[in-house]
Amino acid sequence: MAHWRPVYAVLEREVVRMVRQRTRLVSAMVRPLIWLFVIGAGFGAVLQQAGGVSYQQFLVPGVLGMTMLFGAMLAALTMVYDKESGVMRMLIMAPFPHYWIVVAKMLAAALAALLQASLLLVLLALLGYLDAHMRFGLLALALLATSAACAGIGMLVAAFTRTLDNFAAIMNFVIFPVFFLSGSLYPVNRLPAALKAVALANPYTYGVDLLKHAVLGVLPSGMGADFAASTDIAVLAGFTVAALLVASWRFSRESAYEPMIRILTGKRDG
Amino acid sequence: MNPAPAIQLAVNASGLVKRYGDVLAVDGLDLDIPAGQFFGLLGPNGSGKTSTIHMLATLIRPNSGSAKIFGNDVVRDAVATRASIGLVFQESALDRTLSIAENLRFAGLLYDLPAKVIEERSAELLALFGLEEKRNRPVGSLSGGMRRALDIVRGVIHHPKILFLDEPTIGLDLPNRRKIWRFIENLREQTGMTVLLTTHYLEEADSCDRVAFIKNGKLVQSGSPAELIASLGRYIVEIESPDVEALAQRLMPSLGNHLRDGNVAHFRYAHDDVSRLAGLQTEPGIQVSALRWRQPNLNDVFLWVAEGKA
Ligand SMILES: Nc1ncnc2c1ncn2[C@@H]1O[C@H](COP(=O)(O)OP(=O)(O)O)[C@@H](O)[C@H]1O
Ligand SMILES: [Mg+2]
C-alpha cells in the first residue's frame, strides 16, 4: 500500500529546508562553477583540445553530475541528522511501515539533487555553456536517472551511518572517490586498467556517461560518452532499485529496532 | 466471530517482557486499561515505564508476551496500532528548524490528514494550549514549556483513541508543569480520550482514575489513588528519635512495620484516635524528639510499595 501524503510531507520539508538554507544552495552552485572555471580552464590550457571539444566543455556533464552527487548525498545524510533530532521520532511513530521512510527520504534526496542540477543548468545556459545540439529529452532522462542513483548511494550510506560525527569520513571515503573514480574528469576509456575497473564498478560513472550522451554525444575522439545510453540507463535503474531494497531492508529488519531505541530515548550507547 | 466485549479495552497486555542484553527492563507485565480511562503508570527511574510504552506503541518488540491496543496486536498489526495512538515522548519529537504551524502540517500529513483538516485542528488545538499567537515562530525559539505543549498538540493532531504521555512534565518548572497539566485535563474533557501517563512526580497522578506502580519491570500494586491511599490507613505517623532503631523495635508490636527516613520512622495508623499517640512523648524508655501525623498520599503508597512492606 502506498502512503503518498507522508511522502509529500517529506518532500515538502526537504524543499522548504533547501530554500531556507541559502548557503547550502549557493555552495551547491558555486562548487561546480569553480571546477568548471578553475580546473576546466587550468587543465584546458595544458591539455590539447581534442576532437573539437575543449576541456571545459568536456567537464560540463561532470559538474552537472557533481551537483547531483553532492546534493543527493547531503539530503540523504539529513536522515542521519534526523535520527538525532525529533523528526525521525515523528516518522517512526507514523502509521506506515518503516521501510516507507526510506522510500520517502530517497525521493526527497533525488528531488533535492534534481532541483539543484536544474538550477545549475539554467546558470550554465546563461553563461553560454549549453548549445542547441544538446539532446534535451535525453538530458531530462539523464538528470532523473542520475539523481535517483545518487540518492541511492546517499541512502545506502545513511542507512549504515549512526551519527554525523563521521561526516568527514563519508566525504573522504565515499563522495570524493565516487566523484574522482568516474568519467567526470577524464574519459573512462583512457584510464589505466585498475582505475578503469573501479570506474566500471561505480554506478555514478554511468550517470555521468548518460549526461555526456545528452550534452556531448558520442565523439570519434573518445572525449564523448564511453558506453551505450541503454547500458547507462539499465545500470542506473538496476542500482537505484537495489539501493532502495538494501536501505529499506537495513532500516526495517529486526535488529534495526535497537538503534531505533536510541532515536527514541536519545541514548547513544547501550 | 467473537461477541463484542462488554467493556472495550484500550490496552490489553499480558506477560510483556523486554530485555536489553542482560538487563531485564520489563518482566512479565500484565496490563488492562478500559477505553476512556486516565491511567497512571508510576515508578522510579529505570523501573521500565518507557520500555513498556515503547512496546505498546509498536516501536520496540517485546521479547515475549503480547499486547493489543483497541484490538490491534502491537507486533502483527503495528501500522493499524500506530494509527490509533498518539505519543509524546520524554524527548521531543519536533523539527526545530520549522515553525509551529509547519511542524503540525508535517505531523498531520504523516497521518494522511488533508491540509484543510490540519489547518482546522491546528487552530483549535493551538487555541486550547494558548499557542495560536506563535504559530509562525520557529520551534527552536520556544521555551521548554511551550515546546512540550506543542509536542502534545503534535501528538493528538490525528485524534488518536489513546494518548501515551511519557513523563510529560519532566524537566519543567512548577508553573509550566501546572499548565501542561491543565492542557491534558482540558483535552480529556473535550475528547474523552484514553490517556496512559507515566510520571515519577506522584502528586500529578492524583487525578488519574487508576494508577499502577511498577518496580524492576513488574507491576507491584494497582488501584484508584483513593483506594490505594486508604489501604495504607488513616494516618501516617512520623516519629523522630536519636535512636530510631530502638524506638521502632519498641513500637513494632503496637504500630507494626515502619519505614525509615534518616532518624525519622514512619508508621501507618489505621484508626481515628491518633491523638492518643501524643502520650508516647512522655513514655519512659523511649526517646522522642518530634512526633507528627498527617493524611497519607500517593508518595507514601509508593514508598511503602517500593519497600515491599505495603
Ligand atoms: N536502549 C537501552 N539499552 C540498554 N538498556 C536500556 C535501554 N533502555 C532502557 N534500558 C534499561 O532498562 C531499564 C528500564 O528503563 P526504562 O524503560 O527507560 O525505565 P523508566 O522509563 O521507568 O525510567 C533501565 O535499567 C534502563 O537502564
Ligand atoms: Mg522513562
Image (tube, coloured by chain):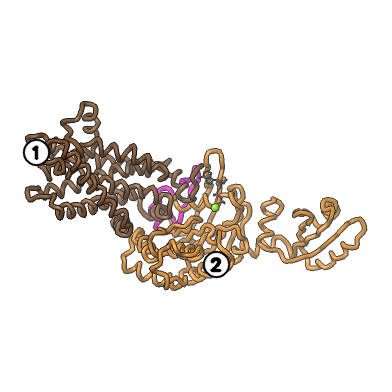
Chain colours: A brown, B orange
- Name the residue: 41% across, 72% down: B124
Residue type, label 2: Asn
Side (left or right) of B95 relative to B232? left
Label 2: how many Cα within 10 Å (few below 14, some 14–19, many 20+): some
Q: Quadrant of residue B100?
A: bottom left
Residue type, label 1: Val
The magenta stretch is B60-84
Q: Nearer the viewer, residue B182 or B272?
A: B182
B179 drawn magenta: no
Q: Position of residue A45 (x, y in %)?
A: 16, 39
Q: Nearer the viewer, residue B190 or A49?
A: A49
Foreground mark, 2 or 1?
Answer: 1
In the picture shown, does residue B161 fall above or below A180? below
Q: Position of residue A249 (x, y in %)?
A: 34, 41
Q: Which mark is residue A218?
A: 1
Side (left or right) of B266 relative to A168? right
The local secondary structure at tag 1 comes to: loop
- Name the residue: 29% across, 57% down: A15
Pointer 2: what residue?
B176
- Residues under labels 2 and 1: Cα distance? 69 Å
